[in-house]
Amino acid sequence: MNFSLFIAKRIRSQKGSSFSKVITRIAIGSIALGIAALIISMAIFEGFKQTILDKIVSQTGHIQILKFDMNNSFETSPLSTQRDFYENLKKQDYISHIHPYTQKPVLLRTDEDLMGLVLKGVDKQYDTVSFKKNLVEGRFITFDTSSYSKEIIISQDTKDKLRLKVGDDLLAFFLQDPPRQRKLEVVGIYQTGIEDFDERLVYCDQGLLQRLNDWGDTLVGGYEVFLKDFDNIDTLYDEIEANSDYDMYLQKVTNTFAHFFEWFSMVNKNVTIFLSVILFVALFNVVSVLLILITERVTMIGMLKALGATSSQILKIFFQNGLVILWKGILIGNIIGILFCLIQDTFKIIPLDIETYYMSSVPISWNIPLILMLNIGIIALVIFILWIPSIFISRIKPIRAIRFD
């Protein structure tokens, strides 16, 4: 039997409530809490980031393509869906989805209130699956194949201000030449928690706006592009812009909503500092515990050296016990962290103010590769740290150690 492994097992199997056992439990708890805190922190931060990004992208896409003009209003100028650029863009491998849209200012009036908003017209190509995540009441628009639908979806903010509910009718006034009006029905209520959308946008059938603008079926206000790889948005934006027609201009989501991405960057730095402190404390505790265990067994180390054991063999005894502490701490920490994330993701036990945090509960993102990398990185780092006590063991002299009290 391996000498170091045999002694290590004997030390671990000792009964009684010795000081070393208490210290060992503290070390396991320290590693477990550190791992749990790392997993939970990363899951929550990634959850915040992904939830807000999904809300923004579901409303605007990753890149918006519009016709270049000097118009500073919310009304969009016409682009044709029969352009070669549009057809070629849909065929690109890096495109996940693309759909046309149109915007037009509108005044919505009820019996008691009047409110200026922007109608955003979409058609059957619109990604309703992503939008329905923000739908809190009612349903999505049912498109009329023979004409256009008179159904609209308003935000929770608009609902509260105009005192509306699903099923209510209201008048929409369009300030154009000549002025026009339409009677519309509210069929759904959405809420993103993001003021840029909730205080401005009302969704309708794009056919309604095409009819009001006297446009044909092939004319739209712009295209919204969804990419397969968001991380590569800058490169793909440059490529799409280079191939676009001369009368087009592009807006990417990272510029339009730069304040959110600057906030992501700031929070990411704070999380990195926070996690670094947690990791440092956990590693410091591991080293401290090993040194305490070594100090407690200085006499044993001296006797083993006197009997011919090398410093390397003795180090392996404490190294193997350190690995046991590491594995137990990592296992318990993963169980605690993953269990907490699972409970929060399922039951939403920690609520949030949607007007402040843009979501109603603490979000969880299940980034399994990141969790695995986190565990592997901590294991490698702790294994490296476990060799530090070798400096102390190599300096222990047998005669002085045997007499150590």
Image: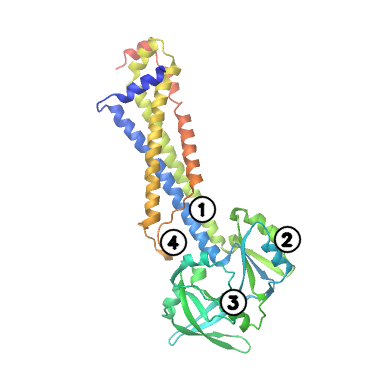
Q: Looking at this rendering, what residue extends furthest in the front direction?
A: 146
Closest to the observer, 338 or 362: 338
Say whether disc 1 or disc 4 marks the residue closer to the N-terminus.
1
Q: Position of residue 70 (x, y in %)?
A: 68, 75
For label 2, the residue is 242
Q: Position of residue 308 (x, y in %)?
A: 41, 10
- What's the amino acid at mark 3? Gln
- What's the amino acid at mark 1? Met
For label 4, the residue is 357
- Identify which residue is drawn at 43% across, 66% down: 355
Rendered image: mark on residue 266: 1
Q: Residues within 10 Å of mark 2 (few under 14, many from 20)?
A: few
Spatial CA distance of label 1 from label 4 is 15 Å
Closest to the observer, 97 or 246: 97
Q: Is residue 43 visible?
A: yes
Say whether disc 3 or disc 1 marks the residue closer to the N-terminus.
3
- Identify which residue is drawn at 38% across, 10% down: 306
